[in-house]
Image (cartoon, rainbow, N blue to C red):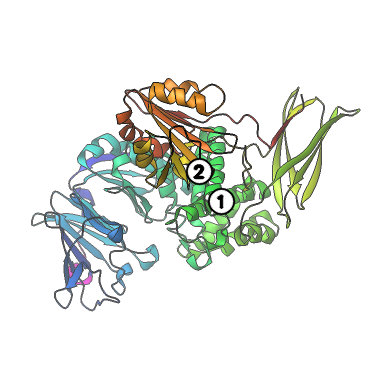
């Protein structure tokens, strides 16, 4: 890998523009000091629709306007500080997806589009970058800012970062190396990377977006390990799934789930099996909170949170179950076949079904029909389980049940014996299935789907309470003194309790906040048992517990309770945790309470 490092202009990469470029390209000029955009169309080009409302026509082929500040109503085009972006910038121009593009910004700035970079020059005090592409690449997205460019050549592509100078110095080398590794990884497993460039552009807004050969990531969290890890891997993989193989949206969006499984889940599994298990458990928890009744085939866009739970988590679990159904070799072969059959075009679930069926050498219609077209999730329950001695050792008989109409499932079982752990798989096809497991040593415990490998409803008691249970609760009560914390965390109407009053039956969660000693005393009077050690740890802390009625309690305290609303703003990033402790320095310490008595586990000793 050859490092070229920081550049203002790389002469070796500057190509002479083709004759007549200015006449054939769409030209976009941006002036950051005034947020002014000037768009000039080539001869013969014409709008196919009205331009954005912030852009007006000032000549036969000329449009001018002022880029608006960021707002929810204009989330696709905005100036934020010195940076700017116009997502789907040219969709209203006939044939713009295949037209050459010329971007011009002041010399201290850089501009980039999700197309192939063919030249960049300094002309009359301005930076000029030229790009080419085709309509199959999707909409044109343009980004500009006071970027420093980091560059490397590796994995068969020119890799670039467009970061603010400070972030360039601190992060560019790591991002270039990570991007190279991911492109090499997926090229080897799927097929060769299809583009000559890969760009990572710092976004002035909290997003993570993939545009084929370009990923737009929030500059505020560039330094987080997660961003260079699973998040960047996810966006790189979209160059294959959703980029080079486009999505046939009319038949459903398969790309988010496949990318989540092959990037996020695969990296977690390689790091530690427990991390992958936690990821799958999180997907099931999100489905419990979201609209799990939706059909997977109906998922189109990740714009709505319940849709995310289905389109990302449920879809990833479907690919996980498919891999278990046909085996890892056939699964990997199916992905390579799907890529070779569909690269450069658009594909749908039917194309995935065809590729995997051919790789497996058998019909998979039942699998895809069930998981794409059937709404909801199965609910598997552990029924009777008993152990009997046999001449060869022991037999464990277990009954699994599900509601009718039954789902066809492969359910993993973990049998713990005096000699070690055994793993079994039971196939369910009806509402009641009885399985007989034999073992030479005496069984001690049996767990059903302990790795959360099946897309199913989680039963009460399968997971500990988490902060998200309170943050997403529909009806929240607050103990006197905790109003400011509840408002800062939840931002929704809450019911104020009298200090001596009971908890209203209609409340799903209760917030108790205040000084350390006061909250500890309140906790002892409100719930049975001793409070956790975290009740007095750090300078501030928050933890959740569940009462006998299934209601979740959030306790938050600090030596100076007036500091709590600000200190606990980070809790939204720890929704999957049961407790968070904030020390004077460093990142918060978090964790989950252990599950003491899961309904999917039975002990025999």
Q: Indicate left or right for 231 with 72 as reference.
A: right
Which callout, 1 or 2, points at the residue further toward the start of the chain? 1
Q: Indicate left or right for 574 with 605 as reference.
A: left
Q: Which residues are magenta?
A: 17-24
Nearer the observer, 532 or 166: 532
- The image shows residue 420, relative to residue 49, as above or below, that is above
Which mark identifies residue 314?
Answer: 1
Q: Indicate left or right for 102 with 191 as reference.
A: left
Nearer the observer, 339 or 80: 80
Q: How far across and down, in percent of the image, does residue 150 sit?
A: 26, 43
Q: Secondary structure at mark 2?
A: loop
In the rendered image, which residue does mark 2 sit on?
Answer: 507
Residue furthest to the left: 124
Residue 149 within the magenta-colored segment of the rendering = no
Q: Indicate left or right for 209 with 298 as reference.
A: left
Q: Secondary structure at mark 1?
A: helix
Which mark identifies residue 212?
Answer: none
């Amino acid at each position: 890998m050859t490092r070229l490092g920081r550049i203002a202009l790389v002469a070796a990469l500057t190509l002479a523009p083709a004759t007549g470029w200015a006449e054939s390209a769409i030209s976009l000029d941006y002036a950051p000091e005034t947020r002014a955009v000037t768009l000039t169309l080539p001869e013969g080009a014409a709008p196919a629709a009205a331009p954005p409302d912030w852009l007006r026509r000032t000549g036969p082929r000329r449009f001018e306007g002022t880029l608006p500040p960021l707002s929810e109503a204009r989330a696709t085009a905005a100036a934020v500080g010195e940076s700017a972006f116009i997502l789907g910038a040219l969709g209203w121009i006939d044939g713009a997806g295949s037209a050459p593009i010329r971007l011009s910004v002041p010399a201290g700035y850089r501009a980039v589009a999700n197309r192939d970079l063919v030249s960049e020059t300094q002309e009359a005090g301005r930076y000029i970058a030229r790009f080419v592409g085709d309509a199959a690449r999707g909409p044109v997205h343009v980004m500009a800012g006071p970027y420093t460019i980091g560059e490397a050549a590796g994995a068969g592509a020119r890799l670039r970062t467009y970061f603010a100078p400070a972030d360039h110095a601190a992060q560019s080398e790591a991002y270039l190396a990570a991007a190279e590794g991911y492109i090499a990884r997926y090229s080897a497993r799927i097929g060769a990377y299809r583009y000559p460039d890969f760009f990572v552009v710092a976004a002035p807004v909290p997003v993570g977006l993939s545009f084929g050969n370009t990923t737009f990531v929030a500059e505020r969290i560039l330094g987080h390990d997660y961003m260079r890890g699973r998040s960047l891997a996810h966006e790189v993989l979209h160059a294959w799934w959703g980029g080079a193989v486009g999505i046939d949206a009319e038949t459903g969006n398969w790309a988010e789930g496949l990318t989540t499984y092959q990037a996020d889940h695969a990296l977690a599994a390689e790091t530690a099996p427990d991390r992958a298990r936690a990821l799958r458990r999180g997907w099931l928890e999100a489905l419990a909170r979201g609209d799990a009744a939706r059909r997977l085939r109906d998922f189109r866009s990740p714009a709505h949170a319940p849709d995310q739970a289905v389109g990302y988590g449920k879809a990833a679990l479907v690919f996980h179950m498919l891999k278990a159904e046909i085996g890892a070799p056939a699964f990997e072969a199916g992905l390579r076949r799907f890529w070779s059959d569909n690269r450069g075009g658009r594909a749908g679930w039917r194309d995935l079904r065809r590729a995997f069926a051919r790789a497996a050498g058998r019909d998979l219609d039942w699998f895809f029909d069930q998981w794409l077209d059937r709404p909801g999730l199965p609910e598997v329950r552990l029924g009777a389980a008993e152990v009997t001695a046999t001449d060869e050792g022991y037999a464990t008989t277990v009954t699994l049940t599900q509601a009718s109409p039954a789902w066809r499932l492969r359910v993993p079982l973990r049998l713990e014996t005096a000699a070690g752990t055994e793993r079994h798989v039971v196939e369910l096809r009806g509402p009641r299935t009885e399985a007989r497991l034999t073992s030479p040593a005496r069984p001690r415990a049996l767990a059903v789907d302990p790795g959360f490998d099946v897309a199913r409803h989680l039963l009460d008691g399968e997971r500990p309470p988490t902060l998200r249970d309170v943050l997403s609760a529909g009806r929240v009560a607050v103990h006197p003194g905790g109003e400011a914390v509840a408002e800062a965390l939840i931002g929704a109407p809450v019911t104020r309790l009298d200090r001596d009053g009971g908890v209203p039956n209609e409340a799903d969660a209760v917030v108790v906040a205040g000084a350390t000693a006061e909250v500890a005393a309140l906790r002892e009077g409100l719930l049975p048992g001793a409070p956790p050690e975290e009740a007095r740890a750090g300078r501030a802390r928050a933890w959740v517990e569940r009462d006998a009625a299934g209601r979740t309690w959030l306790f938050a305290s600090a030596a100076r309770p007036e500091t709590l609303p600000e200190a606990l703003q980070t809790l939204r990033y720890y929704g999957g945790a049961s407790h968070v402790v904030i020390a004077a320095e460093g990142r918060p310490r978090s964790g989950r309470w252990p599950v003491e008595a899961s309904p999917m586990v039975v002990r025999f000793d």
